[in-house]
Image (cartoon, helix red, strand yellow):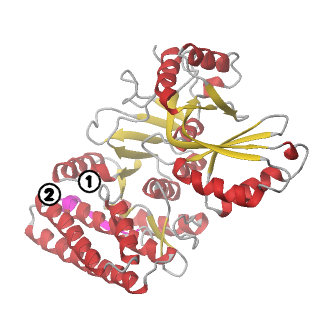
Amino acid sequence: MRLIMKFGGSSVDSASELRQVSELVKSHSQKNQIIVVVSALRGVTDSLLASCEKAEGGDKASAKKYVQDLSDKHINLVRSATTDKKSLNSVEKKIRTLIKDLEKLLLGVSYLGETTARSRDQILSYGERLSVQVLHSVLKDQKIKSVCLTGAEAGILTDSNFGEATPLMNVTKHQVTEILVPYLDKGVVPIVTGFIAGNQDHVVTTLGRGGSDYTATILASSVDADEVWFWTDVDGLMTADPRLIGEAKTILDISFREAMEMTIFGAKAMHPRALEPAMHAKIPVRIRNTFNPSNKGTLVQLSQSVKPVDIVKAVVLVKDVAVINLVGTGMVGKPGTIARIFDVLAKGGINVLMISQTVSEANVSLAIKRQDLDNAINSLETALLGSGSILEISGENDVSVIAVVGAGMKGTRGVAARVFQCVSEAKVNVRIIAQGSSELNISFVVKEKEAKRAVRAIHGEFLAH
C-alpha cells in the first residue's frame, strides 16, 4: 500500500513518543510505501504566536529568552531520543541554525512594532521546521532511510492568502508526484512538514487551522495514496465526549460528510477542510491512536454505513458560544436585511456558527463564538439600530450548541421528535433550532448549565446500545 501517516504534536512530544512513532514507521514501511507528515511539538505553534505578539510590543528580551527555551526544548528532546553521535551533532547544528533565523525574525518584529500576515506565517513555520528535524534524526537512529522536506520543498504550491492559504492543486499534484514518488520507489521515507507550504514567489505560506491534516490529504491526493492515517492520542472519533459520557464509544466507520459535520462542531482529531482532498480523490482516512496501534480506529470513507441502530452517529457539545437576537418588524418583507447583518459581522471578522429565523421575518438569532459577542453587538448596533428595520439587539453568553449527527437521520421519520422528547424529559429548554436540507445534522441551542444533561439524554436515547 501507499500510505500517508500524519503524526500530531501529541505523538512527538517526548523521547518515548518519538520512539513509538519510529517503530510504527519502521514496521509499516517494510511492506508499504510511506510518506510521513509531522506537526510542531505540542503547544509550540501557540507559543510562537504568543511570542510574535510580545515582539510587536517591542519586548526584545522576551524574544531572546523564548528562542533559547525553544532551542533547549528541541535539542534536549533529540539528545534523549537519539543515540548516534554523528546524527545528533548534525541535527543540533540544523536546529541552532533555524533558531538563529527565528530570533532575527522576532527581533525584526520588535524593532518595527508590527507584524504582517506574511511575516507571521514565516515565524509560525518554525514549529514544523524544527519538529521535522527531530523526527528525521530519530528515524535515522533506527536505520530508516528518510529525507526531510518542507511542504514547499515537497511540491505544495498555494495562493498568497497568508494564514489560510489554498493549494493550487493542478500544479501541486504534478510537483509532488515528481518530487516524492522517486523517493518512494527507492524505499526512502519522505518526512514532510505539516501546516506550511509556499506560493509562486517561494514565500512561506500556512494552511490554517488543522493545516497538518490538510498537508497529509493534499499529498495523498497528489500521489494517489491508498489510505491516509491520522495518528493522534485518541482511538478515533467518539459517539460523544468521553469526559461527559463515560460509556462513549469509538465510531468504527463514518462517511466523509458525517465526519465533516462532527469536526465543524469541534470533534477532536481533524479539521473539515483537511478532508476535502481525500474525499474528492475517494481516498479513505483512518484516525488511529499512536499509543494503541492495535486499535484500527475510525475509518472515514465515501460510502455511508447506515444500520437501523445507527440513526445517530454522535452527539457533539459546542462550548464557548453566544447568541445574538435581532428583533424588528421593519425586517418583514425587506430584501437585503440578512445580507446587511452578515456584511457587518464579516467586516468585523466574526464567523456565524448557526442562524435561525422565524417565518414572520421579525426575529433573527445567530450563534457565534463567545469571545466575539461584545464586538458583534457593538458593530450591529452602530450599523443597524435606527435604520428602521431593527428595533432591538440583545446577546446571551450563557449558552451552548448541541449537534446531533448521523446519515441515518435522513429520511427517517420521528428523529427530531425523539431528540426533543428526550431533551424535554431531561428538563432542558431548547432556545434555537437549525437543520440543513442534508438532514445529517440537527443543531440546537440550550442554556450552558443544562447542556451536559441534554447530551447525556440524547446519547442514552440513541447510542446506549
Q: Can you identify the residue that label 2 sits on?
A: 81
Type of residue at label 1? Val
Q: Nearer the viewer, residue 209 or 50?
A: 50
* Spot occupied by residue 119 in the image (x, y as percentages of width and height): 45, 77
> Residue 186: in sight, yes or no?
no
Q: Residue at x 38, y 21 (%)?
A: 247
* Spot occupied by residue 5 in the image (x, y as percentages of width and height): 37, 50
* Residue 140 is a magenta residue: yes
Q: Nearer the viewer, residue 353 or 174?
A: 353
Alpha-carbon span between mark 2 and mark 1:
11 Å
Q: Residue at x 63, y 55 (%)?
A: 376
* Residue 57 is a magenta residue: no
Q: Can you identify the residue that label 1 sits on?
A: 12
* Spot occupied by residue 272 in the image (x, y as percentages of width and height): 54, 47
* Spot occupied by residue 16 in the image (x, y as percentages of width and height): 16, 49
- Numbered disc 2: secondary structure: helix
